[in-house]
Amino acid sequence: MREYLFMALISAAVTYLLVPLVRRFAIRIGAMPEVRARDVHTTPTPRLGGLAMYGGLVAGLLVASRLTHTGEALAESDGNAVTALIVAGGLITLTGFLDDWWGMDAFIKLGGQIAAAGVLVFFDLRLLYIPLPQDWGGSTSLDYTLSTVITIMVVVVTINAVNFVDGLDGLAAGIVCIAGMATWAYSIFLADNISGGRITTTAAIAAILIGTCLGFLPHNFHPAKIFMGDTGAMLIGLVLASSIVTVTPLDPAIIEGMNKVPVLLPLLLPAAVLVLPLVDLITAVVRRTSHGLSPFAPDRGHLHHRLMDIGHSHRRSVLIMYAWAFLFAFGIVGMSTIGVPVLLFPVVIVLALAVLVLMALPRWRGRGGTHASRGRKQPDDDGPPTGPMPPILPETEVRRRVPPADGPTHERASAEGNPVIPAFPSRS
């Protein structure tokens, strides 16, 4: 457990320290686009925060490979997880960097995502079987071709789901962090029941992902000083997908004696930890195609937009989505520790409905809702608008811009003899 904490802290520290440098770099090269109609921030904000996240990821992976127990577990796993994530992460980071800086066609970006997923498969980070209970026919092994196709599909869908939900300050990083925590908890539980140990490749990847997200959040929570952009959203989506792909045990017969929910957890867990991004992704595709638009056409109909439209502030919208993600992710993982887990499904549904009620509260409250303030716009109570703070001017620059003291000013003549209007005319 101490090794997990150590690698998470290393990833968090490196990411946190790299963000200011990346922010300056993004401003210098102009990776700070103008505010669009569908954006919720009000001032241009630098992107490319994913470059710092990639640095934290690489640092965490290299440290993990040198630790006593984690390094041994990574070396004994079928796939070379460290090399695979560094190479695939570098490829997806480069794709996101070019998209954030210059812009990129959606299909070219999709090609980069498929290529990064292909790198994971090349290094044997792929799904080996579909877990099913014995009375459902038992677990089904996958041949290499089918395993490759399904793994690439899982990775690409996860990348785009995370990318779709990245619309508010701190939203994507927080949701992926919660998903990483749930994946880590499940992998620890599974390893403890199978072998009595707690060191697994999945848990190591999830711990590094958690640290990377936590290191970025202080700079990205509202009001954000930097956005992760597609560079970061696609990167953490890739890492999350790799942890989901590696979460299943090598021998599916080991967990057949457990109740049905733990057997199905390798299938349920991705849906649970990604419930919000997946719902957002599916509804966006349906919404856009029903209007005759491309599934990749941007709009302002995402879940976080709807939360703000019904009266929630920026931070409250993010926290509600955090709560929803936590509820589903840890609700499913918690079922694996209960003897009769089917009874927990109604509880999870009731809690989910409670969150939905919380989301609708601004419509019913006398103050703070859109219906209660028809004639005036409620200010955001979360501080200044999203965007970089104005630069601090040097003392000499401040003195140069300060107007002279009150008193008569004398007109000066130019070289041609024409009078020059004084910059600071005297006050009457």
Image: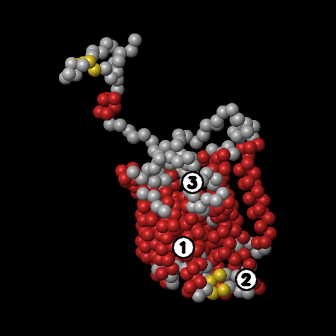
* Image vertical order of residue 147 relative to residue 269, above or below: below
Q: Residue 127: percent from the left, percent from the top?
A: 58, 80
Q: Secondary structure at mark 1?
A: helix
Q: Give the label on residue 242, or none.
A: 1
- Judging from the image, the colouring scheme is secondary structure
Closest to the camera, between mark 3 and mark 2, is 3
In the image, 126: left or right of 93? right
Q: Which residue is nearer to you in this view: 188 or 161?
A: 161
- Read off the residue under disc 3: 167
Q: Residue furthest left?
A: 415
Q: Secondary structure at mark 3?
A: loop
The 10 Å Cα crowd at callout 1, few under 14, some 14 to 19, many 20 or more, is many
Q: Secondary structure at mark 2?
A: loop
The 10 Å Cα crowd at callout 3, few under 14, some 14 to 19, many 20 or more, is many
Closest to the camera, between mark 3 and mark 1, is 3
The answer to which quarter of the image holds residue 199 is: bottom right
Q: Earlier in the sequence, mark 3 or mark 2?
A: 2
- Read off the residue under disc 2: 133
Q: Dots 3 and 2: beta carbons under 8 Å? A: no
What amino acid is found at the position of numbered circle 3 in the picture? Gly
Mark 3–mark 1 distance (CA, rounded to whole Å): 23 Å
Residue at image coords 60%, 40% = 380
Q: Residue 298: percent from the left, percent from the top?
A: 57, 56
